[in-house]
Amino acid sequence: MATEITLRLEALIKSIPRGKVASYSAIAKAAGIPNGARQVARLLHSRAESQDLPWFRVVRKDGSIALPRGGGFEVQKRLLAAEGVAVSPSGKVDLGRHGCDWD
């Protein structure tokens, strides 16, 4: 059974609108978990598929894609681009332009 914190994190991740991104740390902070970025990453790793979470809308606090090339980077970049999110060749998103209001 999911904990209250897990449900809160999932709700926040699901609330990221199309064409926007949020950082792991911003999601954790919005959920009331300071320094909880790793908890967000673990949740996405274990529950993104089963809970239909838009995992690809979550990036590092500097706007970069956390996944390595050949290990999900290209998929995330393609999914973001399909929603109109500009991703640089190095894998960075402009958070000023594409970040959630609460990011």
Image: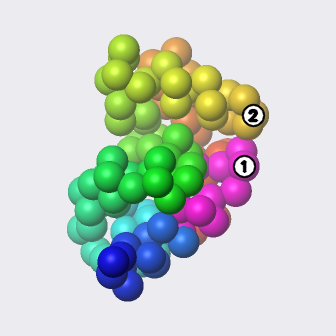
Quick check: can you spot residue 85?
Answer: yes
The residue lying toward the viewer, choosing from 29 and 55, is 55
Q: Residues within 10 Å of mark 2 (few under 14, many from 20)?
A: few
**Along the horizontal axis of the image, is 47 left or right of 85?**
left
Please report the bounds of the magenta region as a residue range.
12-21
Q: Secondary structure at mark 2?
A: loop
**Badge number at residue 84:** 2
Residue drawn where x is 43% and y is 35% of the image? 64
Residue 76: say if magenta. Answer: no
* Residue type pointed to by label 1: Arg
Residue nearest the observer in this picture, 16 or 2: 2
- Between the residue at mark 2 and the residue at mark 1, the CA separation in whole angstroms equals 8 Å
**Side (left or right) of 25 relative to 77:** left
**Residue 17 is a magenta residue:** yes
Give the total of numbered labels. 2
Asked whether residue 22 is in view, the answer is: no
- Considering the whole magenta stretch, tell me its main secondary structure: loop
Near mark 1 (Cα within 10 A), the count class, few <14, some 14-19 or many ≥20, is some
| Above-or-below relation of 65 to 20 | above
On the image, the x and y values in percent for residue 31 come to 42, 77
| Precedes in sequence: disc 2 or disc 1 | 1
Circles 2 and 1 in contact, beta carbons < 8 Å? yes
